[in-house]
Image: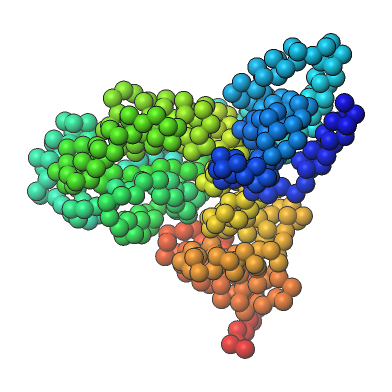
């Protein structure tokens, strides 16, 4: 036993090492390919974030000696950590194993497991990385210019008027929208976006949830110029996330058939195939088809129920989509945040970004820029430029000065330079970096602030705060040269 307890100390050292971005999906592929060294390393990284699947897989590896020396003690420790999340049969395996031990040995094993749960268990990890719910804020709801909900459908101004009256009536009869109109372009893409709405109502970031049937660039460029109703809670404007349907996604079933029958047929064929699917991913894709193509559903909340069932089976994208559905609709916020957090533990980029946003600005959680920076940095390291902007912002402007990292922010700005040339906030942050970096360049600060304000105004952003900063910084005579 002494030898094993010594080995347990070594495991604790591994858990205390520098945390890297988890990528549980890639790690599972290593495990399946019996590349156990790589699998172990990946699972250990995910375990640091409290991933129950990683705990369970590490327990199996130690229990069976897969790539490691067989060790029942380490196996039980990882099973006990997984059991805190009620994961699969972890608790049953523990109970069955303990039942074979003597009373003294059983007590020793239980103490070891309990000690590790205190150091590395759910409560410790949640406190370190995940949101703290503000219970007193939960009854408050976000409204949008006084309305309870935002519209989900966006209609392009490029539409046909006189020739569609009869089709409009048919759309209404089949459950369409009374204000439905038809795009004049016959092959509009079927486009669904998740958008971040800023406190001023402007659209700051978007993520394509569904895109099929054509180029979406024109639609997106048109849409993002339309300010949304301003989100607010308790008379304070805040940012919020929303899902919107554009292009062919606003069509009812009958209009989609009339306007783009091949697209309708493709959706129908694919959904029928997925409905018969048995794998977890096929079941997830079918649930998303029901969510993205509402006319496929046959009963209320069918997509939601299927997403929850799949989330409970460990599918990270289903965890995220179910959590986001609850959050957008402001239903059971703690449950929403729980599922978004769970998805983040699997290294899902959009979940990591969203978790950072929650920690940075959600009215229902304790704001924590240190935790937010961790999740933004993880998503940024995987290539997410929206997360990069948010991470840079914290590094340059955080209230907690210990989070400031000018040199790192400058490097991050260089890394995304070619992808952010149309983003006003990029120029704003670039300006701040020139103001604050060691080799200060005030002329570049002024130039980039002016660019940020000009581009922000063109995108219908509220740039008054930026203008005030520029005005305050240029009191007196300022000379800008090309040298």
Residue 472 can be seen, yes or no:
no
Q: Nearer the viewer, residue 78 or 149?
A: 78
- The relative height of residue 135 versus residue 464 in the rendered view (above or below) is above
Q: Nearer the viewer, residue 83 or 205?
A: 83
Q: Nearer the viewer, residue 158 or 324?
A: 324
Left/right placement of residue 220 relative to residue 113 reads left
Q: Position of residue 130 (x, y in %)?
A: 66, 38
Q: Nearer the viewer, residue 390 or 89?
A: 89
Seen at 38% across and 57% down, the residue is 225
Residue closest to the far right: 2
Q: Position of residue 322 (x, y in %)?
A: 47, 32
| Quadrant where the N terminus is found in the figure | top right
Seen at 54% across and 47% down, the residue is 349
Left/right placement of residue 200 relative to residue 254 reads right
Seen at 47% across and 54% down, the residue is 204
Quadrant in which residue 68 is drawn: top right
Quadrant in which residue 12 is drawn: top right
* Way the structure is coloured: rainbow
Q: Position of residue 37 (x, y in %)?
A: 68, 45
Left/right placement of residue 91 relative to residue 419 reads right
Left/right placement of residue 177 relative to residue 409 reads left
| Quadrant where the C terminus is found in the figure | bottom right
Seen at 15% across and 52% down, the residue is 160
Give the total of numbered labels.
0
Quadrant in which residue 24 is drawn: top right
Q: Position of residue 35 (x, y in %)?
A: 62, 44
- The relative height of residue 13 versus residue 138 in the rendered view (above or below) is below
């Amino acid at each position: 036993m002494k030898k094993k307890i010594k080995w347990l100390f070594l495991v604790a050292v591994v858990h205390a090492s520098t945390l890297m971005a988890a990528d549980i999906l890639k790690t599972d592929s290593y495990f399946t390919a019996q590349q156990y060294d790589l699998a172990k390393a990946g699972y250990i990284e995910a375990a640091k974030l409290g991933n129950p699947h990683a705990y369970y897989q590490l327990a199996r590896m130690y229990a069976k000696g897969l790539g490691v020396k067989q060790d029942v003690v380490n196996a039980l420790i990882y099973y006990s950590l997984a059991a805190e999340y009620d994961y699969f049969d972890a608790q049953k395996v523990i109970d069955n194993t303990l039942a074979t031990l003597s009373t003294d040995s059983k007590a020793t094993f239980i103490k070891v497991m309990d000690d590790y749960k205190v150091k590395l268990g759910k409560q410790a990890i949640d406190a370190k990385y995940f949101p703290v719910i503000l219970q007193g804020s939960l009854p408050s709801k976000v409204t949008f210019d006084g309305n309870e909900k935002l519209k989900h459908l966006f209609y392009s101004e490029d539409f046909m008027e006189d020739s569609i009256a009869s089709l409009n009536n048919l759309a209404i009869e089949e459950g369409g929208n009374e204000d439905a109109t038809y795009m004049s372009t016959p092959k509009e893409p079927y486009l669904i976006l998740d958008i971040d709405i800023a406190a001023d109502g402007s659209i700051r970031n978007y993520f394509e949830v569904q895109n099929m049937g054509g180029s979406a660039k024109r639609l997106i460029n048109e849409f993002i110029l339309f300010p949304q109703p301003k989100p607010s809670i308790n008379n304070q404007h805040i940012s919020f996330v929303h899902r919107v349907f554009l292009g062919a996604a606003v069509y009812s079933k009958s209009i989609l058939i009339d306007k783009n029958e091949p697209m309708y047929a493709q959706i129908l064929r694919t959904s029928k195939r997925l409905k018969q699917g048995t794998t977890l991913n096929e079941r997830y894709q079918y649930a998303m088809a029901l969510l993205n193509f509402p006319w496929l559903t046959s009963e209320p909340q069918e997509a939601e129920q299927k997403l929850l069932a799949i989330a409970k089976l460990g599918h990270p994208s289903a965890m995220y989509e179910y959590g986001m559905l609850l959050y957008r609709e402001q239903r059971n916020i703690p449950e929403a945040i729980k599922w978004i957090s769970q998805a983040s533990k699997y290294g899902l980029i959009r979940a990591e970004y969203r978790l950072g946003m929650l920690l940075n600005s959600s009215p229902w959680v304790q704001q924590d820029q240190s935790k937010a920076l961790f999740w933004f940095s993880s998503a940024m390291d995987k290539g997410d430029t929206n997360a990069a902007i948010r991470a840079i912002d914290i590094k340059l402007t955080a209230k907690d000065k210990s989070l400031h990292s000018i040199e790192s922010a400058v490097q991050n700005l260089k890394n995304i330079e070619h992808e952010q040339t149309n983003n006003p906030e990029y120029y704003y942050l670039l300006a701040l970096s020139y103001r604050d970096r060691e080799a200060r360049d005030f002329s570049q600060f002024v130039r980039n602030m002016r660019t940020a304000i000009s581009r922000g105004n063109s995108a219908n952003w509220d740039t008054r705060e930026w203008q005030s900063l520029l005005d305050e910084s240029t009191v007196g005579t300022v000379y800008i040269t090309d040298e």
